Image (cartoon, rainbow, N blue to C red):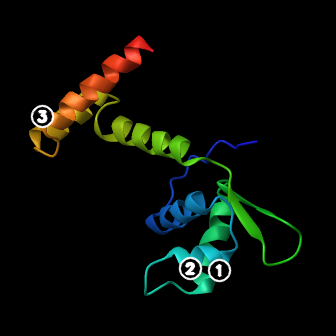
């Protein structure tokens, strides 16, 4: 059963560890450490991050003896939606139109990308 993510946002380091855990599905700390590019953080650093993620309610572990096998309690899509919704609410008055408008004004979104978005929205309306 998936838990609802805590209202607290994750730090950059916590999100990075979550990315690796989502990729692995479940893992021991040493397996998460192995996913990092060189120079890798220390085992104890990643272990601390994972325990913080557990306190925040986004990770849990299996087993009663160490090393624990950790697994995410929230899937990547759900977390991504929550982060995007917070971004839209905090910076764009809750309007996805304002978000897209921002990217088009900053020229970070090409006409082709806008057309792809429109195509996806039209297809979603027909589903």
100 sits to left or right of 17: left
| Disc 3 packing (10 Å; few <14; some 14–19; many ≥20) | few
Residue furthest to the top in view is 126
Mark 2–mark 1 distance (CA, rounded to whole Å): 6 Å
5 up-or-down from 125: above or below:
below
| Disc 2 packing (10 Å; few <14; some 14–19; many ≥20) | few
Helix, strand or loop status at disc 2: helix
What x and y, as percent, mark residue 103? 18, 40
Q: Which residue is mark 2?
A: 34
Tell me which residue sits at (53%, 74%) in the image: 35
Viewport quadrant of the N terminus: top right
Mark 1–mark 3 distance (CA, rounded to whole Å): 44 Å
Q: Earlier in the sequence, mark 1 or mark 3?
A: 1
The answer to whether mark 1 and mark 3 are in CB contact below 8 A is: no
The answer to whether mark 2 and mark 1 are in CB contact below 8 A is: yes
Tell me which residue sits at (69%, 62%) in the image: 26
What x and y, as percent, mark residue 120? 33, 26
In this rendered view, identify the residue nearer to me: 88 or 119: 119
In this rendered view, identify the residue nearer to me: 123 or 80: 123
115 up-or-down from 22: above or below:
above
Q: Earlier in the sequence, mark 2 or mark 3?
A: 2
| Disc 1 packing (10 Å; few <14; some 14–19; many ≥20) | some
Q: Which residue is mark 1?
A: 30
Helix, strand or loop status at disc 1: helix
Residue furthest to the right in view is 64
Task: Inspect this view and state whether residue 47 appears.
Answer: no
Tell me where residue 38 sits by quadrant: bottom left
Q: Tell me the number on the disc at residue 11.
A: none
Q: Which residue is mark 3?
A: 111
Viewport quadrant of the C terminus: top left
Tell me which residue sits at (40%, 12%) in the image: 126
């Amino acid at each position: 059963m998936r838990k609802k993510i805590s209202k607290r946002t994750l730090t950059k380091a916590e999100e990075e560890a979550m990315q690796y855990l989502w990729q692995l599905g479940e893992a021991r700390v040493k397996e998460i450490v192995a996913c990092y590019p060189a120079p890798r953080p220390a085992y104890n650093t990643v272990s601390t991050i994972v325990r913080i993620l557990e306190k925040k309610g986004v990770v849990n572990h299996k087993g009663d003896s160490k090393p624990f096998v950790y697994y995410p309690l929230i899937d990547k899509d759900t977390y991504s939606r929550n982060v995007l919704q917070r971004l839209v609410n905090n910076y764009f008055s809750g309007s996805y139109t304002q978000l897209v408008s921002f990217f088009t004004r900053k020229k970070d979104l090409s006409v082709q990308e806008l057309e792809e978005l429109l195509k996806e929205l039209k297809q979603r309306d027909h589903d």
